[in-house]
Each structure stands twice: as structure tokens, then as C-alpha cells.
Amino acid sequence: MDNDFEFSGMIDRWRWIESLNASNVFADLVSSYSSGDIAAMGSSYPRGNSATSVQRGKLWELASYYMAVPSTPKKLVLQLENKWDKPYYTLWIKAQGANIGHPRATRVQASAGKDPQGNSYIVYTRDFDRALVVLRLQQGWGAHTYGEPTAITIPLPANGKWLPLAADGTVGVAVSSIRLRNSEAAILLKAGTM
């Protein structure tokens, strides 16, 4: 099934994945956009907190996977490139290798509203043993914008230090809040747990 950062209905796909996995059915969460597709979007989908727009899109897709993954992930796989002629290990982003542990709870809706550009959004969070995953899901249909003017600030729990994980596997300095643009996500490692 498609993993699409431009689709407002991803919450229903996450629920469907959960119901499939609960019925012992295997699910494959496949990217709607190749890296080349995202790069071709140009300035309409800028890099945001990431080094490139491609890394931003792929980090969102990884966070989307984390929003749906069960505590035993044997029945759910993530495919970040919809290419069947290449070995799977060549299509990973390094952030996939970070051991964030198991989900400690189901995802929660942390906030909802409209950003400064009038885009509706919902922010979901999910707590893992060693990370907090934060995903901003666009809402509604029609034209959306994804640039800096859509950014909102999301405060992080005060009970720890949070280190942003980049798509390339590098880790940033500790933050107490994160700014997310429309259809952007963050994976924040809990300092001292890695």
C-alpha cells in the first residue's frame, strides 16, 4: 500500500495496516514517490529540516512506518523506493539503521490546527524505547504548500534531551522543540539511550 506524504488519508492506511497485522497478514508499505520524483518537485517541496528535499520525504515515509508498526514488526515492511529490480539493502536510508527500540504506546494525536498559510494539519507522536517520532500530516484536499511559511513549532516533552536523527543517519544537537512544515516529520532520539 502507498506511503504518501501528500495524502491526507494516511491515518486510515495506518489503521488498515494495524488490522491486517492483527489478522496475521503481511503488509508492504511502499513509497508513492521515488527519490527522483521528490527531487523533481523542486521548490514546491523544499528540504525543511533535512539536507535535501529527498531526505525530507524519505524521513517522513520512515516516520509514517513507525506510526503503524506493531510491537513485533515481522508482518510489516517498508520500501522507500518502488523499484523491484534493485536489492533492498541498496534502497535504504541510513536512518533506518538507528535502533529506536519498540513502540511503548500507540500513536497519539498531539495537536491539530491551521498553519500560518492556512493549511490544516494534525500532528501525531509515538513514543519508542529510545525515540519520539513526530509526524505532521496534512489535512484536506486541493492545493497544499510545503515551504517555510507553513512551519509550526511543536514543543517536546520536558522529561529528556531530544536529538534529531537525520535521514543520512547523523544526529543533531539537543532540542526542546521542533519546527515542522506541512508534511514533514522528525525522529528524535532520547539522549543517553543509544
Image (tube, helix red, strand yellow):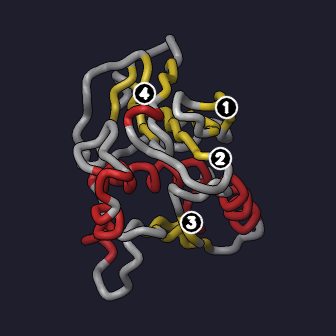
Evaluate if marks 1 and 3 touch, with contact meaning CB atoms under 8 Å apart: no
Mark 4 to mark 2: distance in Å?
18 Å
Horizontal and vertical percent for residue 175?
36, 19
Q: In the rendered image, which residue does mark 3 sit on? A: 76
Decide: is 96 above or below 148: below
Decide: is 49 above or below 3: above
Evaluate if marks 4 and 3 touch, with contact meaning CB atoms under 8 Å apart: no
Local packing at callout 1 (Cα closer than 10 Å; few below 14, some 14-19, many 20+) is: some
| Residue nearest the viewer, comparing 156 with 94 | 156
Mark 4 to mark 3: distance in Å?
29 Å
The disc labelled 2 sits on which kind of residue? Gln
The disc labelled 3 sits on which kind of residue? Leu
Of pointers 2 and 1, the one earlier in the residue sequence: 1
At horizontal 38% and vertical 28% (from top left) the residue drawn is 193
Q: In the rendered image, which residue does mark 1 sit on? A: 112
At horizontal 59% and vertical 68% (from top left) the residue drawn is 75
Q: In the rendered image, which residue does mark 4 sit on? A: 179
Evaluate if marks 2 and 1 touch, with contact meaning CB atoms under 8 Å apart: yes
Image quadrant for the C terminus?
top left
Q: Nearer the viewer, mark 4 or mark 3?
A: 4
At horizontal 48% and vertical 22% (from top left) the residue drawn is 153
The disc labelled 4 sits on which kind of residue? Arg
| Residue nearest the viewer, comparing 62 with 146 | 146
Picture disc at residue 139: 2
